[in-house]
Amino acid sequence: MENGDSGWSRYRPSKTLWGWSIVGASALTMVLGFTWGGWTTSGRANVMTEIAVRNAKADLVASICVHNFVTANDAEHNLKALQAKSSWQRDDFITEGGWAKIAGIDGTVTNAADACADQLVKMKELPRSGGDAPVTDS
């Protein structure tokens, strides 16, 4: 012990041990990165992108749907009828009314009628026409 040549200072790992240590550290790094580190595979990133695009389309169409619903004739009557429907019938009511139909888009946008119905049901009363809404340049 006087020379400091005993214990850990004399230990020399083999190349095999170094190799397996590197493999183990790499595997541990990948496991931690993909579970807690927020890493994603390209496949998972593509799925996340598709979900984000679908939700953005639904939000856009739902906003247009609310505008179409509010500005339509008999909007008060339609709102009362919509609120009287059960939650699973509301999207059909919106789709059958044609408020979620957008020119240039064939078919329906997934979840748009549901989002539109949810926004309309939350309204206590319809917004008054005639300058209540801010005007934008876009």
Image (spheres, rainbow, N blue to C red):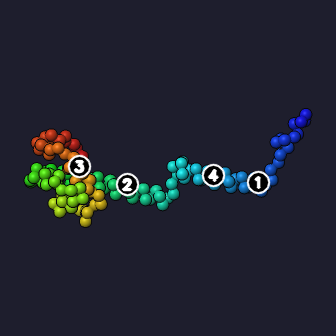
The quarter of the picture where the N terminus appears is top right
User: What separation in Å lies between label 2 and label 3 (alpha carbons)?
Assistant: 20 Å
Q: Which residue carries the number 2 mark? A: 52
- Determine the image quadrant of residue 47: bottom left
Q: Which residue is mark 1?
A: 17
Q: Which residue occupies 58% across, 50% down?
A: 32
Relative side of 55 to 127, left or right: right
Q: Which mark is residue 119?
A: 3
Which callout, 2 or 1, points to the residue nearer the camera? 1
| C-alpha gap between disc 3 and disc 1 | 63 Å
Residue assigned mark 4: 28
Towards the viewer: 14 or 60: 14
Local packing at callout 1 (Cα closer than 10 Å; few below 14, some 14-19, many 20+) is few
Query: For the residue marked with disc 2, what is the amino acid?
Result: Ala
Q: Nearer the viewer, mark 2 or mark 3?
A: 3
In primary-sequence order, the first of circles 4 and 1 is 1
Q: Is residue 21 left or right of residue 127?
A: right
What is the x, y in percent for residue 55?
33, 54
Position in image of residue 95 (x %, y %): 20, 61
Asked if 11 appears above or below 78 in the picture, the reply is above
Q: Earlier in the sequence, mark 2 or mark 4?
A: 4
Q: How far apart are the alpha carbons under marks 2 and 4?
A: 31 Å
Q: Are marks 2 and 1 in contact (CB under 8 Å)?
A: no
**Are dots 2 and 3 in contact, CB under 8 Å?**
no
- Camera-side residue: 85 or 24? 85
| Residue visible at 19% across and 45% down in the picture | 123
Contact (CB < 8 A) between labels 2 and 4?
Answer: no
Mark 4 or mark 3, earlier in chain: 4
Mark nearest the camera among 2 and 4 is 4
Label 4 packing within 10 angstroms: few (<14), some (14-19), many (20+): few
> Which amino acid lies under the numbered mark 3 shown in the image of this protein?
Gln
